[in-house]
Amino acid sequence: MIPSHVVNRPTGRETGSFLALDLGGTNFRVCEVVLDGHSGARVRQSKHTITEAQKAAPGNELFDFFADCVYNFIAENGQAALTKKYKLGFTFSFAVNQVAINKGFLILWNKGFTNSGVVGADVVALLQAAFHRKKLNIDVTALVNDTTGTLMSHAYIQPSTRVGVILGTGTNCAYVERMENVTKYTPTDTPDAKEIIINMEWGAFDDEQVVIPRNKYDVKVDRTMNVQGKYTFEKMISGMYLGEIVRFVLVDLVKTGEIFKAGASPELNKPNHFETAFMSRIERDHTLDLNDTRTVLEDMLKIPRTTLADRRLVKTLCELVGKRSARLSAAGIAAVVTKMNKLDGCTVGIDGSLFELYPHYSNRMRDALREILGISAEYVVLEQARDGSGQGAALIAALADKQ
Ligand code: GLC
């Protein structure tokens, strides 16, 4: 429960041109966002993939890479653009102890990042220093979590938005809380603020492991991925982990002789070789013979021969793991909306590949919401949000200017 220092929601009338940097997990983006003042924005962006080596490099190298990408991005507008002064919103989608709108200390890495020298450091200062090394005239004016960005960018076009959720590589939620309820934080620089966005870091919910029942595959994922004992809720929900849960079950079923009687494959035994994207593909396979499932299993995972019964079993397994993820995230949303006393109506802006691309995901969430909230579920609107990490960061940079 981290106060984001964002105490205003957008009106839709914000204007101006801002840079945004977005480090979410697999991708890194540089964006130039021009807010038009009519709930609209123009965005130019460049996208980069972060390699496994970059995720393990010393922190300064990672931040120098960011600065290089920004340099090249600005240089596309001509050499003169490089001397201009810019304001930048930094979407850094990791657990950060945020102490000011533009200052926050990394609590721990997740999503496979292990760069040294960053945990415990102010990530804005690290980025600012990398810009100085590159002689870029950029002011990092806002540090933003992707959920906060999502909430803000969706509120820019849909004012009833009170919650922002990410369901992608990781999962998390931000919501609007009344200031009087936030006892851990006094807004000294904005004493009149009535509300504040809270970054819940809900991925770390139940790290004590007392609330949510876990099975032996969850325990295995926890032991083998990222920091053990941390991010328990996220490990049962988000794209980084679902495929690995399925893989562990398959390996077990092979051992007990219940699947792939012609033998498994070395691929199936390699960590993270069953991608969550495979689950999407298998769940989308409605052919009689489950042909696309066969492609995934035999061509991509090199299983020598599969029977229809094998493929059906794999599909059921994907359904179980995919459904559990959707239902747990719906449970989270139901809890937040109940806590906010917003069962009479509010919009939840949701972004991320699971919500956007995984078949049936949003319907499963809706079904679960109905089970939990009954008729009130009808007033909780789940909407696809877009580009919270780019436009949301720009909006927060715009509002930080006024704050
Ligand atoms: C992880 C991060 C969190 C982020 C989420 C979604 O849980 O700790 O800050 O919002 O992933 O990207």
Image (cartoon, rainbow, N blue to C red):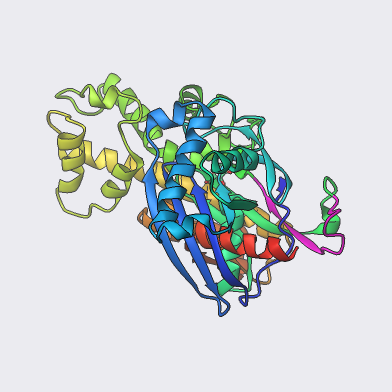
Q: What residue is at 51 percent from the left and 75 percent from the top?
A: 40
Most common SS among magenta residues: loop
Quarter-of-image position of residue 245: top left
Instruction: Inspect the magenta stretch and tell me whether residue 192 lies in it.
Output: yes
Q: Return the residue found at the far top.
A: 255
Whether residue 269 sits left or right of residue 150 in the image: it is: left
Q: What residue is at 35 percent from the left and 25 percent from the top?
A: 271
Instruction: Looking at the picture, tell me which residue is in the foreground, 183 or 84.
Output: 84
Q: Quadrant of the C terminus?
A: bottom right
Q: What residue is at 62 percent from the left and 52 percent from the top?
A: 139
Percent x, y of residue 151? 60, 61
Which residues lie in the magenta part?
A: 186-200
Instruction: Looking at the picture, tell me which residue is in the foreground, 308 or 277.
Output: 277
Percent x, y of residue 325? 47, 45
- Residue 385 appears in the picture as rendered: no
Percent x, y of residue 379? 60, 71
Instruction: Inspect the magenta stretch and tell me whether residue 236 lies in it.
Output: no
Q: Quadrant of the N terminus?
A: top right
Instruction: Looking at the picture, tell me which residue is in the foreground, 133 or 100.
Output: 133
